[in-house]
Amino acid sequence: MSTLNQNKSKSSHNFRHLIPNMADENSLSHFVLLAKKFPMLEADEEFKLAKCWHEEQHEESAHALLQSHLRLVAKMASGYRGYGLPLHDLLAEGNIGMMHALRKFDPGKGFRFSTYAMWWIDATIKEYILKSWSLVKMGTTASQKKLFFGLRALKSKLRDQHGDLSHEGNLSEELVQEISKKLNVSREDVLMMNERMQGQEFSLNSIVSEEIGGEWQDWLLDESENQEVTLAHQQEYEKRHSLLQEAFQVLAKREYDVFIARRLEEPPKTLEELSEIYQISRERVRQIEMKAFEKIQNEVHKSAEKIGILN
């Protein structure tokens, strides 16, 4: 690792003490008050600080850049308050996104730090929401993420335009079709996401009720086959497979080859193909196949009677 990369790695661990630490639900007002203490930077001043950090790893420059953009974090984090997550966590994630942006920002590209940082702040907050909002992982594809974050805003906007088009939280068909079209996702995806966002989730370890007692998982029905039955079926299969392998021993080589080609290969060979291989007629191939089948059937029947598994 180069000296410059080593310095970046070391400096990145010191970023967290450069921004306010939020610890309560009154975070936004407190955060904004703190952010206003730091002056906004002019473009030329921001460029000098960013260049100093990028080339020399000057921590005071990083300090000034981060703190001058705390208002941006506050503004973007406040836009996600409707997802029911603690605001101080959203602010903290926004700060982490801004720190990522500072590590990767190149002032030589010619654009402002805020323009670059906005993408990182937004992406980090969204990733946190997707991981924390639901007990079950959701929004794994780009279209699902777009739907998750766009559905709430679009529902509100369309209701303002058309009135309440839903019934008890369920979307009307008209609203579903319009949302599907605007977000370029399927109708089924819209319905599924809306149901997920409305539904309340419970831990399987939650108590059902004080009267009934027990946890939710105690009431789950396992519909899979009983393990003893599965084992019995497996043993039965192994016995029959063993009988079949033993029965093959009574076949002549050509009988065995024809039987395998016609009954066990996928796809099976045709009578025409085998007649050409063995230079015999198709009828003769069929006779060999049937003779081999009868031999195997008789041998399996006799062996099964001996060990008592014949049905």
Image: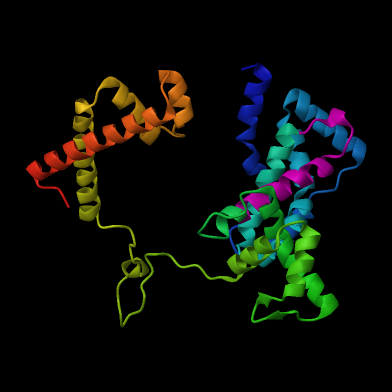
Magenta stretch: helix, strand or loop mostly? helix
When the figure is inspected, residue 141 is found, relative to residue 59, above or below; the finding is below
When the figure is inspected, residue 102 is found, relative to residue 23, above or below; the finding is above
Where is residue 138? Give x, y as percent: 58, 55
Q: Front-most of 245 and 261? A: 261
Where is residue 251? Give x, y as percent: 23, 26
Q: Is residue 30 visible?
A: no
Q: Front-most of 108 and 303? A: 303
Residue at the (65%, 39%) spot, across then down: 15
Residue at the (60%, 69%) spot, across then down: 195
When the figure is inspected, residue 255 is found, relative to residue 175, above or below; the finding is above
Q: Is residue 266 visible?
A: yes
Where is residue 185? Give x, y as percent: 73, 57
Q: Residue furthest left?
A: 306
Quadrant of the frame with the N terminus: top right
Q: Front-most of 289 and 210? A: 289
Residue at the (65%, 45%) spot, across then down: 96
Q: Front-most of 32 and 208? A: 208
Where is residue 183? Give x, y as percent: 77, 58
Q: How many marks?
A: 0
Q: Report the magenta residues as a range.
A: 105-129
